[in-house]
């Protein structure tokens, strides 16, 4: 990568200088202890920002799965098939992946805060026509559009955290934020099951309207801009108004606005298809998300049909992977920074993105083992506690892989971290949205044993990736370096 972040140098310079450049304009940049630099903000200010965007990152994936316990009720109410109702999840998840391709680079052009507030306001409002949907066509259409705007928390969360935290501090914070995209689909069916059982499926979306509106209001009140170029642009305009003369931002891109915008819109796709490591990791994450949504959309059939659970009891099943998420974030994720700092110190403080990858091997082992475990215990109808225990390890493996990979993206593309994360997100969300449509057919034809084992074999095939990229990643990045 050509942005100079993979060789252990600082991601941003630490100067506020008024030296004259070739165009006789003074340079505007941050000082080492500049209060306006997001990395120098007080912890309270940083964590308020993280809390608001983390809630956004929880709510949109929560909306993706919250209505799944009501699939049968929706099908009956809208006079359609259950497979058509699953299509509403597919549309939402696919656009949840497409959204970052546009919203991430836009945040690198216009700033983070504007994108968060505009997009999440629209997302909150779209829950109203969803709740009022008179037919399945309306439900699918509105859900798909809302998925696009709801993706803003996923699209820009990693970039926002990169704005505020140094690499040596980042993984632990990012781990808690990253619970959102995974915890949302996990607790969604539990809450949705309670609402569907005691009220109706439409109240799922009225509930989402309320909590999304509250989150949006909190954003307008407390969310601060964290993208350095946007903050410096405001400072530059202030200097020009108060002091006169011309100023420029350090490393300012002087291309015409529309040229910069076009370039930024192409950035995620260029990263995805020109960087072998990003493409491979994106495929790995896509398999994980396809597996997750295939399991989640079939828990009702597995535990309701095979084990005789009620709707509320099926909702509780989703706490299995959720427990794995929390165990991982509490005990394993903080060690990502520990390993990263240890390896950096061991190599003369020359930090490399590959130092994020060693702990990914934990997930590489746990994912296929937990899937084989779940597949065949369900196939032979072993006691339900044994099947749910396997999902705890599946959740643990998911968080380990997703966290290490996302941190790897951020370290490799620092300034364009949001675009790098978007590159991986689009692939995983599209696969995660489409695969569950075909999963029930596969399970019906070959059974849960071999059907779920198919996902296990795919994850097993990619399990050597962390070891290979740890060893050869620097050479691969150098070989395929691009100018962003």
Image: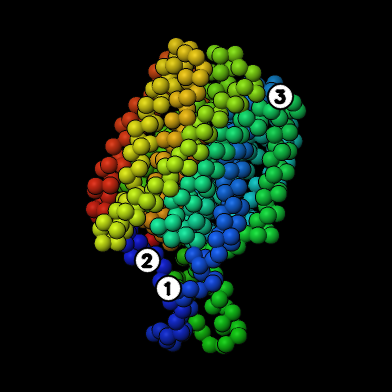
Quadrant of the rendered image containing residue 467:
top left
Looking at the picture, the colour scheme in use is: rainbow
**Residue 456 at what x, y percent from top left?**
38, 26
Alpha carbon separation for disc pair 2 and 3: 54 Å
**Residue found 46% across the figure and 50% down from its top:** 172
Marker count (numbered): 3
Q: Residues within 10 Å of mark 3 (few under 14, many from 20)?
A: some
Q: Secondary structure at mark 1?
A: loop
Instruction: Say which mark, if any, is on residue 10.
Output: 2
Question: Is residue 351 in view from this perspective?
Answer: yes
Q: Residues at badges 1 and 2 in contact (C-beta under 8 Å)?
A: yes
**419 on left or right of 241:** left
Q: Which residue is mark 1?
A: 14
- In the image, 73 versus 358, the foreground residue is 358
Q: Residues within 10 Å of mark 2 (few under 14, many from 20)?
A: some
**Residue found 57% across the figure and 56% down from its top:** 47
- Give the vertical position of 460 relative to 348 (above or below): above
Instruction: Say which mark, if any, is on residue 221.
Output: none
**84 on left or right of 197:** left
Alpha carbon separation for disc pair 1 and 2: 9 Å
**Residue 246 at what x, y percent from top left?**
51, 84
- Give the vertical position of 412 relative to 238 (above or below): above
Q: Secondary structure at mark 3?
A: helix
Q: Which residue is mark 3?
A: 197
- In the image, 410 versus 148, the foreground residue is 410
Mark with earlier residue (1, 3): 1
* Quarter of the image that includes the C terminus: bottom left
**Residue 275 at what x, y percent from top left?**
33, 50
Mark with earlier residue (2, 3): 2
């Amino acid at each position: 990568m050509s942005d100079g972040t993979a060789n252990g140098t600082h991601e941003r310079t630490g100067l506020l200088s008024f030296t004259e450049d070739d165009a006789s304009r003074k340079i505007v940049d941050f000082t080492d202890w500049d209060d306006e630099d997001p990395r120098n903000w007080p912890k309270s200010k940083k964590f308020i920002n993280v809390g608001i965007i983390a809630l956004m990152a929880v709510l949109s994936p929560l909306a993706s799965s919250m209505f799944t316990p009501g699939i049968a009720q929706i099908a009956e109410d809208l006079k359609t098939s259950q497979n058509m109702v699953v299509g509403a999840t597919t549309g939402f998840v696919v656009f949840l992946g497409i959204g970052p391709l546009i919203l991430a680079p836009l945040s690198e052009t216009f700033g983070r805060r504007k994108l968060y507030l505009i997009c999440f306001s629209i997302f909150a409002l779209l829950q109203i026509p969803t709740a009022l949907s008179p037919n399945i066509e309306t439900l699918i259409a509105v859900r798909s559009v809302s998925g696009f705007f709801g993706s803003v928390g996923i699209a820009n969360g990693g970039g926002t955290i990169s704005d505020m935290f140094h690499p040596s501090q980042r993984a632990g914070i990012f781990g808690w934020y990253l619970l959102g995209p995974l915890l949302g689909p996990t607790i969604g069916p539990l809450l949705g099951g309670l609402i569907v059982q005691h009220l109706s499926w439409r109240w799922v979306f009225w509930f989402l309207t309320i909590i999304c509106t509250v989150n949006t209001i909190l954003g307008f009140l407390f969310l601060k801009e964290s993208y350095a170029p946007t903050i410096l642009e405001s400072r530059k305009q202030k200097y020009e108004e108060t002091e006169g003369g011309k100023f420029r931002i350090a490393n300012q891109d002087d291309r015409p606005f529309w040229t910069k915008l076009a370039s930024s819109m192409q950035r995620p796709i260029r990263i995805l298809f020109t960087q072998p490591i990003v493409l491979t990791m994106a495929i790995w994450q896509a398999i994980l998300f396809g597996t997750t949504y295939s399991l989640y959309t079939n828990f009702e059939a597995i535990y309701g049909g095979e084990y005789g659970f009620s709707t509320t009891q099926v909702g509780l099943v989703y706490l299995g992977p959720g427990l794995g998420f929390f165990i991982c974030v509490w005990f394993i994720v903080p060690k990502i920074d520990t390993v990263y700092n240890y390896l950096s110190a061991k190599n003369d403080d020359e930090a490399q993105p590959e130092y994020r990858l060693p702990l990914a091997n934990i997930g590489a082992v746990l994912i296929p083992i937990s899937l084989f475990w779940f597949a065949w215990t369900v196939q032979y109808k072993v006691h339900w506690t044994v099947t749910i225990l396997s999902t705890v390890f599946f959740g643990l493996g998911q968080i380990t892989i997703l966290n290490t990979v996302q941190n790897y993206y951020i370290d490799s593309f620092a300034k364009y971290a949001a675009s790098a994360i978007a590159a991986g997100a689009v692939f995983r969300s599209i696969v995660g949205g489409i695969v569950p449509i075909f999963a029930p057919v596969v399970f019906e034809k070959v059974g849960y044993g071999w059907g779920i084992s198919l996902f296990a074999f795919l994850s097993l095939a990619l399990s050597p990736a962390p070891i290979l990229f740890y060893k050869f990643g620097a050479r691969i990045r150098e070989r395929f370096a691009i100018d962003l």
